Amino acid sequence: MKLVTTSYVDNKKETFTKEYEMQVDNGAAMNVVNLYPDIEYQTFHGFGGAVTEAAGYAFSKLSKENQEKVADQYFGTEGNQYNLIRTHIDSCDFSLDNYEAMSDPDDVSMESFTLDRDEKYILPLLRAGLAKRKEPFDLMLTPWSPPAFMKTNGDRNHGGKLKKEFMGFWAEYICRYIKEYEAKGFPVNRITVQNEPEAVQSWDSCIFSGEEEKVFLRDYLYPALVKNDLERIKVNIWDHNKERLYDRAKAEIDADTDKMIDGIAFHWYTGDHFEAIGITKDAFPGKELIFTEGCVEYSRFDASQLSNAQMYAHDIIGNMNAGMTGFIDWNILLDEKGGPNHVNNYCDAPIMIDTKKDTFEQKLSFDYIGHFSRYIKKDAKRIAFTKYTDKLELTALKNPEGSLVLVALNRTEQDLPVSIRLEGKTVDFTVAKASIATAIF
């Protein structure tokens, strides 16, 4: 067994690896964690983050040498090995300003449609990641708002709704975006119908009730996908906070829409609500449950790297044990201000770039995410375990080739002993205080 541990003491992080020999189980009973790889739960699709215009802009300010290093950190074989990417259809708050692929209401054939803006910052970062990864991402596209002319408030920002007379046009617009991305060499696997459909924001936003989102999907978007030979694209609904996850699924999934909806996406901004994931999983078995956004907002959280990294690990573990099938962080990169953001809604990212000094900082959150993403492979199966104490937060998975991965988070100020029991053998080790550890069997 190999154990990788990251600790953070006196504002310094240290990662170290140690090998252990499994021993014959002679009746271990204290400090036990049992692993049961024969009991399997959901299939896990992988880890990733959002490539926003802000991320691409920050990336563009690095020298070629440092761009290579950053791309390696996220996508290389020795890095966090991201395979899931989410990006935005037209602008979002983490864009330099509002923009649209086309803004002419009279251009019904979309002749003015262009992805020139994506070509400036988003696609170069995607290409850099693809060069390191050497195989396509599982790519998700998400709209924050339809073009302003399609909305009741005539504005990309401040909520508003999609006008009924533009529902068909907006569905075709989304299909066009998918086709344009694929023509540029980026196959699209998934979309969400609308980012945060219940939030009126000062940035790009659009309101859909559960019934409105269902009608748009059923009567316009899904038929447009079929018409454009894009029925293979997986559609996720909601894409908002966990506390209403089940409510939204119940409002939208019925006999007509069940085949149209592949999953329910969720964010973390209103707290744990791990039970909501479990309830939704039980009520709608077979649906994806993908975490699609979470970040350390400067307006809400302090600058403690340890507490922020622990927040990530706590949420990943709780979500995964409840039934999550994929994890997509928010911006993978941001500049020294926590942007750019066209409404100054700044936040932290796992890698922060100083655009004036051509340097980057790898935050502790990056390492904590890596304790999962580097070792848990695409299509791993979550497996059963038991643990002796609630002071340890644990999850365990079995990779497709058969290796087992146990991630242990210790948020306490005391070292915690562990005796792993696995198929007639045991191994003892300690999870240090204020650390995260990954055991690979």
Image: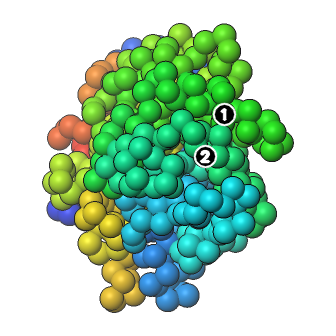
Label 1 neighbour load within 10 Å: few <14, some 14-19, many 20+: some
Residue nearest the viewer, comparing 371 with 153: 153
Contact between marks 1 and 2 (CB within 8 A): the answer is yes
Residue type at mark 1 is Tyr
- Residue 187 in percent (x, y) is at 74, 54
Residue nearest the viewer, comparing 202 with 38: 202
Quarter where residue 434 is shown: top left
- Residue 290 in percent (x, y) is at 53, 35
Task: Name the residue beneath numbered marker 1.
Answer: 220
Asked if 75 appears above or below 238 in the picture, the reply is below
Residue type at mark 2 is Trp
Q: Is mark 1 on a helix, strand or loop?
A: helix
Cα–Cα gap, marks 1 and 2: 9 Å
Residue name at image x 57 percent, y 25 percent: 215
Task: Name the residue beneath numbered marker 2.
Answer: 170
Q: Is mark 2 on a helix, strand or loop?
A: helix
Label 2 neighbour load within 10 Å: few <14, some 14-19, many 20+: many
